[in-house]
Amino acid sequence: MSNTIMPRRTLLKGLGTLVALPALDAMIPSLSQGQAGKKPACRMMFISVPNGIHMQDWTPKATGAGFALPYILEPAQNVKDSLLVLTGLTQDKARPNGDGAGDHARSAAAWLTGCQPRKTSGSNIKVGVSADQIAAQMMGQLTRFASLELGCERGGLAGDCDSGYSCAYSSTIAWRGEATPVAKEVNPRNVFERLFGNGDTTESLESRQRRSKYKQSVLDFVLDDAQALQKRLGVQDQRKLDEYLTSVREIETRLTQAEKYTKQANLAGGQIPVGVPAEYGDHIRLMYDMVLLAFQTDQTRVVTMMYANEGSNRNYPQIGITDGHHDLSHHGNDKTKHAKLRQINRFQIQNLAYFLEKLQAIKEGQNSLLDNSMIVFGSGISDGDRHNHDNLPVLFAGKGGGSIQTGRHIVYTENTPMNNLLLCMLDRMGMHPDKLGDSTGRLQQLI
């Protein structure tokens, strides 16, 4: 083991390029030696899916630690011990409460705010600050990026998208202010360039152009720094660094392949944005890989991600479903539609499990990166046919740095505010607001 001690913010630098590094033993010697000391940072992520969930195949039959994962959640079996299935949580402010139709827009807007969105399709939108942005505003100065807002479907912030509700409500779950939605980035290439750019627009553009022309990697621009660093590290850190740089190169290769495919498709008359994979599962996984890189290198601790805009009617040909998702969600208790919905939901969890297993495989001190995270996956609608907002599908992953007891199915009293969970999460991020939206206190039974 090397005696080298490095700052956590050590960077590899090159033309237009900054490569942040994962946590190495040389950066946190107290943790690598198993001693009490500085704890790794806790991360927070919220992942939303549209149109509700097929709850019959989502909700475990047993409670407590002895539950079996139902059909939709089965793909997450390898990380079951790091999961909590939380039943009974509600977002009351997604309900009409006198405002009539528009449940899709309200469900997205209220999901992380617990506030009733003003019914308008004009510029006078209003809801509330979301939990992710509260965390970003209070601790964003500790990381390179206060937060990342990602998605896999483009959406506008103006116009009428749902029964008189602005598209801003259904296209984002992150709200920096009560009238300030945060637009999401849907192109994985743009996220990659943001994570590995040095902030100098001219240099970053030159770097990108050179990489494209000479088929180079961002790593080629920091090769000298990387080789010098390797010589200073112990054997274990050398292996960690090599694995990390290999993963960066592999992701960059996949991005390049996606760009080639979309350019060819567009020449043939397609309308796919360059850099966005044509296959939806590839798109989701590349976005998850961007989050993994950002969390692993502590470039941000707060992320939101939308699989699609609320009310999305995209189809799923990759799993043999050509019907629109929103159309299917109005199932009318049709068995054929039920079967397709549960396949869509299982596909969504398969991609989530890909991400969670990667987080679990990365070590930070005595814990895994998953242990040091809090990830909420779910929807602001329960049953898409009923448009109800009680008994929401909420899957929690990670242990919040070791303070949360996972591996359980917990059933809460009917109409327990979901914002009570959000307050508990903010507590573990080092913030302790008295109230958030319609919260009534902290959620019990988590510790």
Image (cartoon, grey):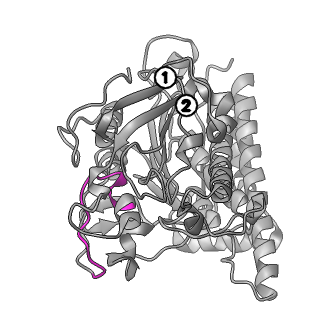
Q: Position of residue 171 (x, y in %)?
A: 44, 68
Q: Position of residue 409 (x, y in %)?
A: 49, 26
> What SS does tag 2 mark?
loop
Query: What residue is at 67 percent from the left and 30 percent from the top?
Result: 77
Residue at mark 1: 63
Query: What residue is at 34 percent from the left and 36 percent from the top?
Result: 421
Task: Name the foreground residue: 142 vs 171.
Answer: 171
> The N terminus lies in which quarter of the figure?
top right
Q: Is residue 116 magenta?
A: yes
Q: Is residue 437 magenta?
A: no
> The C terminus lies in which quarter of the figure?
top left
| Residue 198 visible in the shown view | no
> What SS does tag 1 mark?
loop
Q: Residue flagged by tag 2: what amino acid is it?
A: Pro
Mark 2: few, some, or many residues within 10 Å (few <14, many ≥20)? many
Query: What residue is at 74 percent from the left and 45 percent from the top?
Result: 247
Q: Reply above or below: 265 against 287.
A: below
What is the spatial separation of the Cα atoms under label 2 and label 1, in whole angstroms? 7 Å
Q: Position of residue 232 (x, y in %)?
A: 68, 30
Mark 1: few, some, or many residues within 10 Å (few <14, many ≥20)? some
Task: Name the foreground residue: 180 vs 217.
Answer: 180
Q: Reply above or below: 430 against 216.
A: above
Query: What residue is at 44 percent from the left and 12 percent from the top?
Result: 36
Q: Position of residue 221 (x, y in %)?
A: 71, 58
Asked whether disc 2 touches disc 1, contact meaning CB atoms under 8 Å apart, the reply is: yes
Q: Reply above or below: 410 against 116.
A: above
Residue at mark 2: 60
Q: Residue flagged by tag 1: what amino acid is it?
A: Thr
Q: Is residue 190 left or right of residue 211?
A: left
